[in-house]
Image: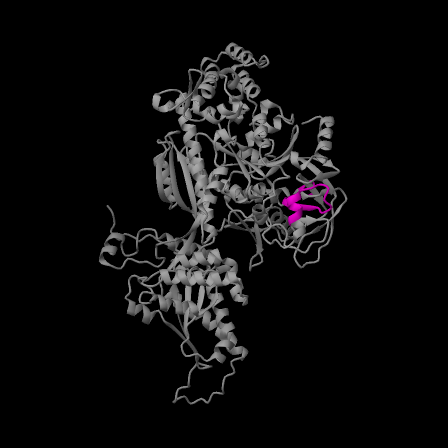
Amino acid sequence: MQAPRELQHFADAFSKASANAIRNVCIIAHVDHGKTTIADALISSNGIIPPRLVGQMRFLDSREDEQERGITMKSSVVSLSFDPLLLNLVDSPGHVDFLAEVNSAVNVADVALLVVDVVEGVCSQTESLLRQAVLNQVQVILVLNKIDRLITELKLTESEGFQHIRQLIENVNSTLSQIFHGLLLEEQTDQIEWDKMDAVELRHHFHPSHGNVLFSSAIFGYAFSVEDFASKWAPKLKLEASYLQDNLFSDCYFASGQLQHDAERKGKKTLFEQLVLTPLWEVYKVAFQDKDVDKLKTTALKLGLPALKSKRCEEAFHELMRTWMPLSSAVARAVARCQSAKQAFTSDARIARIFPANDCDEIVKGLKSCDPEDPLLLLFIMKLYVIDDKKLAVCRVMNGIVKKDQFVFPVRKDKESDSQRVNSINIMLGKDLHEVEQAVAGSIVAVEFTDFPSSCTLSNQKINSEGLGFDTAGMEPLVRVTLRTSLDLQTATQLKQGLKHLSIVDPSVRVFEQEDGDLALVTAGEVHLQKCLQDLEQLGLTDLEVSEPIVPFLETTVPDLQSSNAKIVATHLTECFLKNFNLKLKLRAVPLSEEIVQVMKKYEKCLSQFKEGIRSPELLTFLKELKEAASSTLPGTKGTFWVRKTREDVEKIFDGLWTFGPRKAKFNILFNMITEKDDTVIRSLERAVIGGFELAMSLGPLCDEPMHGVGIVVEELGFVAPEEDSEEEKEPVEVTDPQLQGQMISAAKQTIRAALRKTPMRLVTPMYKCKIQTSAQALGKVHTVLGQRHAKVLDEDINQATGFFEIDCYLPIVESFDFCEQLRKKTSGVASAQLHFSHWQVIDEDPFWQPSTEEELEEFGEKGDTVNQAREYMNNIRRRKGLPTDEVLVVNAEKQRNLNRKK
């Protein structure tokens, strides 16, 4: 840790720093690619930790479980000085369960260090993180880490190393290009400006000569760019440094006092091989093959470095590399060329990204100016946390100066704002804090409040606005557990307070009270769940009862390919007759295509607008696209009500769109296709029918899980004349009769459930996309585990660089618990897996299937000997909810006696 006098000097400089000198930098990478080690190397350069502990101390991983697992679980900030720059460094998690933490880090940064393991290359998280950085218009520096693995593990020559590095940079650029083209197509502009798009893509293109690519080995504390070697070699080769830099990573070689082209075709070593890789390879050869300390000391003197003090070979090598090409210097030079905090929000495009409401000119002006002299203070809260009972908000000062004891107001729309006092302002040094009197525009600080603010945007003035709209969404929380504690009222209150605190500080957590009164905690995944439970334990909740993890399912209907069209039209129509009121209801359940569901997901906000009767241009666009998707996909769908329908028929049905599903089951549609309409009756019973529809969609007939992708077509609703032979004289029914309304809700619900049962029902399960890396020896064991977990293998290939097999597959989330642990045990630690949420998948198996044909009976037996996985899932859910199952429970089993006496 820095000495108190040095720390005070740094604090004084921090409080008066110019926004032009501030760089807000986040480190993003796939898990285990070296983010935290690079952070340690940068922190070490400021004297906070000793160089020998780089990569071992993991300074920013302050949680005990982070140290045990060796992975980062939260975003951490440390402020560093690289005179004249002030660098606010944000380390973010690489594990997919903590995407919300990563998004928070990217939101407050202006520059991102994208760290890629030079051997493993572009992984699943690499692509999603690069996309997030591009979306937020953050300048990206590519850091190719673990260069030493090319020499020590892969045993590549200098030429092979150059080819490998060049191919990797091309892969990253290819990923970047796909991201840009995907974003362009998402905009759905009528006129795509390809020239403009190419110019933007070229500006973000990674190439060593542009200064946006670094080569590093964080564990040994060194990094370099081509600029570093160009400046060293240019005087010796009598060339301009800029000219040499432009060609150092090209297909050129040096001969006859000048640069020549076509090195690869002529069989010559390229400049990068000659001037960069050959010296590097030689130093590694001396250190790890010859293990000659004296040679290393001689090399250091030849390079003009101080004499090495280390006596052991590996320590001497470490000392040589971090002295010759210090990682902190290379990163500082690269970051210095990037946008400062002052320049970060000068473009209208980036402001539109973070301030989509754009309903306050003062905020726009403040974002663009980033001026400490401006009287308007703007604070954006990145995350909330608690240390020693202090409620702290990690804030970026967007404009003005924040001072201790100042009062600030939440920026909210049409709501009265209560002021909050700034109790203290702190420079962040990982888990340590150092209090200062003020922080200027561009800074990232920890601000202490008495209570957590009610808005993520704060100001010293009352502003009526939506505020800043940074994206803090992470992975969809799907893994749920039920928490119980002792019946003691104080402990139950403590649990509620603990969960409330957890939901505030972690945006990926969902907390709600279930119908039975128990509290439910919903998290992004297994690792995230374990982190949350440990957080609750640290709050004093040590004796919690935690249920088995629960994963949500959905229910849907699929085409009935076993029935004819005439049978489907006739039998799937379901009728309900309320005898007391002479009221008839006829409807049918029909499947909707995946394209229709995707349109509804895309315009999810419009579903509530339609239900509330709010008409907007976006809603009209949504209805147009919905009708287009339906008319292009539904006509001719075999095994459904749609098979004989034309485009015009489908459009007519969608013109009768009545409502969408409830909050839990949004992506279902109720259609009004009543031909003989009595508008008075329909208007009076509309809310009752819609209420029944929402109840039926919330609780499907298989196991009371929400419905998905289903249409309910109401074909008849109205009063019918009483039968002539009816003896009872019934009084005319008032459609507003509360008894009728109540019975209508129940009747609509039960009729819809009956209609659904007439169609082939299926379960829908959430799926992980799983990427597994393993050796050839453990490949068979990996497939055994995947088979036991009902995974679907998509691709299997060998990575030529590492020699490991890489398997891509889909894994049901319900089967994912302890999956990584089982994989490690079965393969003795050789195989590793990365999981991230992919999509919802219909399980093809019929939960009610029984062998019926002669062939099926011969293959499966009368009872169906094979396990019906869909039925297993369905019965497990029904048992958990207390619903009956069709399983037979044997209470007293006795072995049948053999009457023949054995002699």
**Residue 847 in which image quadrant:** bottom left
Q: Nearer the viewer, residue 564 or 414?
A: 414
Q: Percent from the top left, x then y, of residue 134?
A: 51, 42
Toward the right, the furthest residue is 405
Residue 156 in sight here: no
Q: Is 277 situated above or below 406?
A: above
- The percent position of residue 111, horizontal first and vertical second, equals 57, 37
Q: Quadrant of the N terminus?
A: top right
Q: Position of residue 194 (x, y in %)?
A: 44, 45
- Colouring mode (rainbow / by chain / secondary structure / one colour): one colour
Examine the rendering and report whether any part of residue 570 can be seen: yes
Q: Nearer the viewer, residue 503 or 537?
A: 503
- Check residue 381 for magenta coloring: yes
| Residue 430 percent location from the top left of the image | 64, 34
Q: Left or right: where does residue 488 sit relative to residue 576?
A: right
Residue at the image point whose x is 36% and y is 36% from the top? 781
Q: In which quadrant of the rendered image does the C terminus lie?
A: top left
Residue at image location 71% in from the left, 41% down from the top: 372
For the residue pair 382 and 572, the one nearer the viewer reads as 382
> Across the whole image, how many numbered discs are drawn on residues?
0
Q: Find the magenta span and give its range.
A: 364-393
| In this view, 329 is above or below 587 | above
- Locate residue 490 relative to residue 184 in the image: left or right: right
Seen from the viewer's position, the closer of residues 851 and 799 is 799
Which residue is painted at 71% across and 32% down in the image? 13
Q: Is residue 554 magenta?
A: no
Say which quarter of the image contains residue 789: top left
